[in-house]
Amino acid sequence: MIDYSKIEEKWAHYWSEHKTYEVTEDLDKPKYYVLDMFPYPSGAGLHVGHPLGYIASDIFARHKRMNGYNVLHPMGFDAFGLPAEEYALETGIHPAVSTRQNMEQYRQQLSRLGFSFDWSREIYTSDPNYYKWTQWIFTQLFDHYYDLQNDKARPIASLVRRFETEGNLYVRAAGGEVPSFSAQEWKKMTAKSQDEVLMQYRLAYRKVGYVNWCEALGTVLANDQVKDGHSERGGHPVVQKAMTQWYLRITAYADRLLYDLDRVDWSHALKTMQSNWIGRSEGAKVWFDIDGLDEKIEIFTTRIDTIFGATYMVLAPEHDLVSQLTSPEQAGEVADYLAYVQSRSEIERMAEKKVTGVFIGAYAINPFSKVKIPIWIGEYVLKDYGTGAIMAVPSDDDRDRLFAEKFGLEIIDVVDKSDYPGTTLSEKVGKIINSDFLNGLEVKDAIKLASEKAEEWGIGKAVANYKMRDANFSRQRYWGEPFPIIYDKDNIPQALSLDELPVILPVTDDFKPTKAGQSPLGKLDSWVTLSNGYTRETDTMPAVAGSSWYYLRYMDPHNESTFASPQNISYWESVDLYIGGAEHAVAHLLYARFWHKFLFDLDLVPTVEPFKKLVNQGMIQGVIEFILLEKESNAPKVFVSADLAREGVEYIKIPVHINFVNDYGNPQSYLSLNGIRQFLNWRPAFKGAHFKTRNGVVNLELKQEVKFITVSEVGKMSKSKYNVINPDEVIDRYGTDCFRMYEMFLGPIEQAKPWDTNGIDGVSKFLRKFVDLFYDKNGNFAHSDQSPTPEELKVLHTCLKKVSYDIENFSFNTAVSAMMIAVNDLRKLQCNKREVLEAMVRMIAPFAPFISEELWHQLGQSGSVHLASYPIFDEQFLKEDTITYPICINGKKKDTLDIDASLNKSEIEALILHSPNIDKWTGSREIRKVIIVPGRMVNIVV
RNA sequence: GCCGAAGUGGUGGAAUUGGUAGACACGCUGGAUUCAAAAUCCAGUGCUAGCAAUAGCGUGCGGGUUCAAGUCCCGCCUUCGGUACCA
């Protein structure tokens, strides 16, 4: 009847020949922009988890198209990134080459899935025609500052003009601390000093940051490559090393990023995550004098009311003043502690419950109580949080209390919570005590008064603080966009102009960093040094650079004079629907929003937000299979069947490729004799090892039945876990339409679930039954032109209603169920009416694009079904005469009763009370109440 | 640690607004067809007891609100995602 591989080829060819999915900026139609999150083309190829979101967005896009929208649905690649470079280090294959191959593989795999992408708009971030504009946007960030008065980005040139006429006294801008200066003073500054001042204002600027430095590998490592303070590759120690790097001043946009969350249709969970990540808190900056030194320590606190309880201070170990403040007596201890902290990652510092710190031998003066208090350093204070220093109030903060208790520091109670039993320390309630002029005030009033006084006395200032930090934008790596920055002889950076872009990433075959840990580009002297003696920036940009604006490039992907023309941008505006993984919740989605807002400030985009509606797809997880190796065993190494594992014996879990395992994912999954042989061929290092099962050590030479039990876990599908399942195999066997519908049928799109093919036969059967409706017993295409019966129309329209609703609500699994029900019902009715079948074809088209196209043409239609209109359901066919009511006694269902649908509440109640079954239901107990929800249920309370 | 999410039969899941728990599908059991198998078709299938009618129990655990809770509230447990250089 229908040969799936043939029709897939046939219609894919037809669509590409007829440019079915290519779109232009058609002003006569309403537009709709459906976007998938940018894939990184990894070497493992596309696995069954990737298409989940793509299938969903494709169904949605096709549905919109059939409803008359001009749909932009593009695809491209986030092609710069670390894995390609790591691969190059291992194999010597240039990242450009492996990336090109990977993209080719992805493109092929994606095209098999029948997506309605407009491939004429494909982009990839490592294309110089693309990254020219990534670099250009960076130069714009470099050349702008954030004007707090007008709340928007403005050119740095206008700031310079202001400095020249009035200095910086009245400038209100986002940025670092700059001492005030006059116009005269500005003009007298050297170019270098002026540059340093401007760096405090630029939206792309340079400052010192910390990187994971691995001395043994001579390279900077990504967080991902560091485990427990050691490099994942080789297990060498990793330390935090200071380096001057580029940063983006995303904090300037913190408030807008926070408040504009109200304007987007995203899940509550996602908005909460972003809002918590931004972490705005209202409080005060306070300056503490240092005993015997003309310096101040700036702290941020949300609880200035507790300042009389501040009995010590803690600085981040990296705080600028630490070296200056450390006393000779404490120098040794401080140095030891700093070495310890250097080996600790930020996540360890935050997660650790262990309290550590040292006294640095200096004292500060509490500005309110004037008491001399000791200054400590401790890893729980992070340099980039707030000001990198805190006033510690052990009576009113859990961490400060633990610290004070451990080191025997003074604790003064300052908040009396006896009026608020059961409240925690972090709740802002209570009466202030032991605090001079604040005594007796409620916390909220005390905060207000203390801030006012601090401002009046010039020792503090009310401000908002953000947990979010500026984005580190430098990578000491090869495979990324070169910065469009050159340095003059004084090391003053300058942005290149548009006509000097793109700065092409030079070709090299040496991907090892320089001795000092700089990017491999640092070795290319002829590239780095320009003829006029200027030098290039050798760091490259991170992967977030290219993915922060790619959705705009799709609007006008081949434009050579601008990143996208104003006409095209004003037509497509922004993304209407964005589908992608929740793992991008804060990083990518915040950076893209930040860039978009910046471009909005420059009048380059018409909207303040890039992604109107966003749906998170769940991850399809894989099964990870392990076998147990006895830790102490050696020569021979001993593997033990999992059912023989004993307490008290240590085992190492060795991952096994799932293809070797029988019944993988099952508690009883095992390696057969053949599986063990495959494993040993794959991991020759284990040749000669013993495999113990219940029947003793397996003799690999003898032909026998072997069940060597493995350990199964659920986790990310990834190349490193040897559990990647390629969609190609599934498609070969079942066809694309079946694969698409099965992925949708697996469950709700947002939910994570492990992959298995257990239910795929059901979907396959459904498609066969669906096609069968069009054929007679002898396998001939046959349908009737008679009018459908009311019953047939009811089946059709019930289904249409459900499917239309479900597509709009991203409930594709239930849409598939509804279609299964309709096909089963039509089959029972032996319906082959053209009117019904044709509507069914159009209905299923977004889900099963190939079969529907084939049947559409077999029905004698011309043109693509995907450009036909989507069928609309009609309520008149759904009317019911009677409704089956559940009869509940005290909320438990006892019986059902068919009741005329036209009856109202009291008529139903009368009917129930006079029913011959009433005594049976109630057990002759007294009826206290009858609750009737018309159309729903009846509950009798006895 | 912190932020977010999830937990329902043997399995994937359904229950749209507090209103019939388990739709649809897999698997399993029995039957039809077949020399046999596959495929297909029909019937049954939450658990416990019972020949059955039926009764009791049942949405991670412990409480609560309600005529009625998978759904709302409080307190836990487990798993997953993120945690600022994987993308």
Image: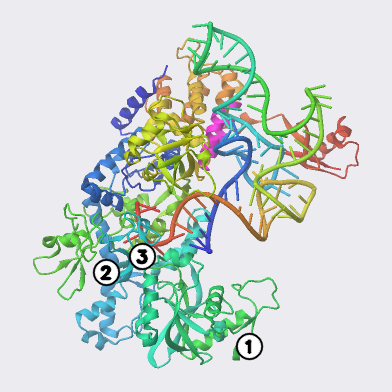
Tag 2 residue: A143
| Residue projecting furthest to the front | A635
Q: Which mark is residue A886?
A: none
Q: Secondary structure at mark 3?
A: strand
Q: Magenta stretch?
A: A794-820
- Label 3 neighbourhood size at 10 Å, few (<14), some (14-19), many (20+)? some
Q: Earlier in the sequence, mark 2 or mark 3?
A: 2
User: Which chain is home to disc 3?
Assistant: A
Q: Earlier in the sequence, mark 1 or mark 2?
A: 2
User: Percent x, y for residue A158?
Assistant: 28, 75
Tag 1 residue: A439
Dominant secondary-structure state across the stretch colored magenta: helix
User: Percent x, y for residue B85?
Assistant: 36, 59
Q: Quadrant of the N terminus of chain A?
A: top left
| Residue projecting furthest to the left | A531
- Label 2 neighbourhood size at 10 Å, few (<14), some (14-19), many (20+)? many
Considering depth in this image, is A8 or A63 the residue closer to the camera? Answer: A8
Tag 3 residue: A471
- What amino acid type should be assigned to the residue bearing mark 1? Asn
For marks 2 and 3, give the CA distance.
17 Å
Considering depth in this image, is B3 or A706 the residue closer to the camera? Answer: A706
Q: Secondary structure at mark 1?
A: loop
User: Which chain is home to disc 2?
Assistant: A
Considering depth in this image, is A566 or A889 the residue closer to the camera? Answer: A889
- What amino acid type should be assigned to the residue bearing mark 2? Asp
Q: Do pointers 2 and 3 mark residues of a single chain?
A: yes
> In this rendering, is residue A663 above or below A77?
above
Q: Do pointers 1 and 2 mark residues of a single chain?
A: yes
User: Percent x, y for residue A542?
Assistant: 30, 58
Residue A311 lies left or right of residue A423; in this view the side is left
Does any portion of residue A268 appear in the rendered image?
A: no
At a point 89% along the width and 33% down the height, the residue shown is A919
